[in-house]
DNA sequence: GCCAACGTTGGC
DNA sequence: GCCAACGTTGGC
């Protein structure tokens, strides 16, 4: 089993949106970055755990735990001209973008803020806390996972 | 709202 | 294949 961190903007799709979905499950669509795509497509497996992170908001941080409910499959929003994620260069015969389904496991008791995460020496290697890193999906090591959970 | 950092695009 | 221009991300 793998561990991940996935970013989402709470104004667009936050932890409470996920909690309100049927079966607490939603498609994680709209990823349009190749490095992140490769992880969605090739590495994520059903049952993998992930931290749900709120980005681009007043208090960025980890707010919940979710799991992969369906492994990578083509992101059909790339072929929908009405979608804001439409990518005319994505060919249905050779899908360029992928998504997974994510199911909420639980909300954390509190927001573990980016500021706190930055202060932990054992988390210094996470792309999340490194300046300028914009990956919206990233792997988390078992050690990092435990260290973060211990902060809750 | 600002802007640094970074990824992508496209002319050459 | 280089690299400048441009668009996006995301913390602050």
Image (cartoon, coloured by chain):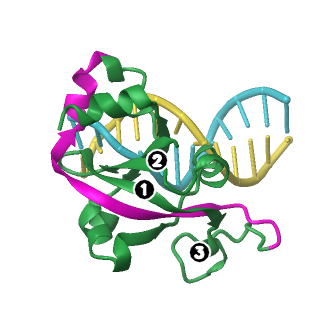
Chain colours: A green, B yellow, C cyan
Q: Secondary structure at mark 3?
A: helix
Give residue A32's mark.
Answer: none
Measure how far apart labels 1 and 3 are at the Cα level. Answer: 22 Å
Res B2 → quadrant: top left
- Image point (58%, 56%), residue name: A32
Res A147 → quadrant: top left
Left or right side of B9 for C9: left
Q: Chain of mark 2?
A: A
Give residue A77's mark.
Answer: 3
Establish if A79 lies above or below C9.
Answer: below
Left or right side of A137 for A75: right
Quick check: can you spot residue A131?
no
Left or right side of C3 for A144: left
Which range of residues does the magenta coloring cover? A93-121
Label located before the other in sequence (2 or 1): 1
Residue extending furthest bottom? A82
Residue extending furthest left? A110
Measure how far apart labels 2 and 1 are at the Cα level. Answer: 16 Å
Residue that numbered label 1 is attached to: A67
Res A8 → quadrant: bottom left
Residue that numbered label 2 is attached to: A136
- Image point (72%, 61%), residue name: A96
Q: Chain of mark 1?
A: A
Q: Secondary structure at mark 2?
A: loop
- Image point (33%, 18%), residue name: A122
Measure how far apart labels 2 and 3 are at the Cα level. Answer: 18 Å
Label located before the other in sequence (1 or 3): 1
Q: Nearer the viewer, mark 2 or mark 1?
A: 1
Residue A137: horizontal and vertical position, in percent?
Answer: 49, 46
């Amino acid at each position: 089993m793998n561990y991940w961190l996935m970013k989402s903007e709470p104004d667009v799709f936050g932890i409470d949106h996920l909690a309100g979905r049927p079966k607490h499950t939603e498609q994680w669509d709209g990823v349009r970055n190749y490095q992140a795509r490769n992880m969605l497509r090739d590495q994520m497996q059903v049952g993998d755990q992930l931290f749900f992170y709120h980005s681009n908001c007043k208090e960025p941080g980890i707010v919940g735990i979710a799991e992969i409910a369906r492994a990578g499959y083509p992101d059909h929003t790339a072929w929908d001209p009405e979608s804001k994620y439409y990518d005319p260069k994505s060919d249905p015969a050779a899908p360029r973008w992928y998504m997974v389904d994510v199911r909420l496991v639980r909300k954390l008791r509190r927001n573990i803020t980016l500021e706190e995460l930055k202060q932990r020496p054992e988390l210094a290697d996470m792309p999340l806390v490194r300046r300028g890193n914009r990956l919206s999906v990233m792997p988390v090591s078992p050690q990092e996972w435990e260290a973060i959970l211990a902060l809750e």
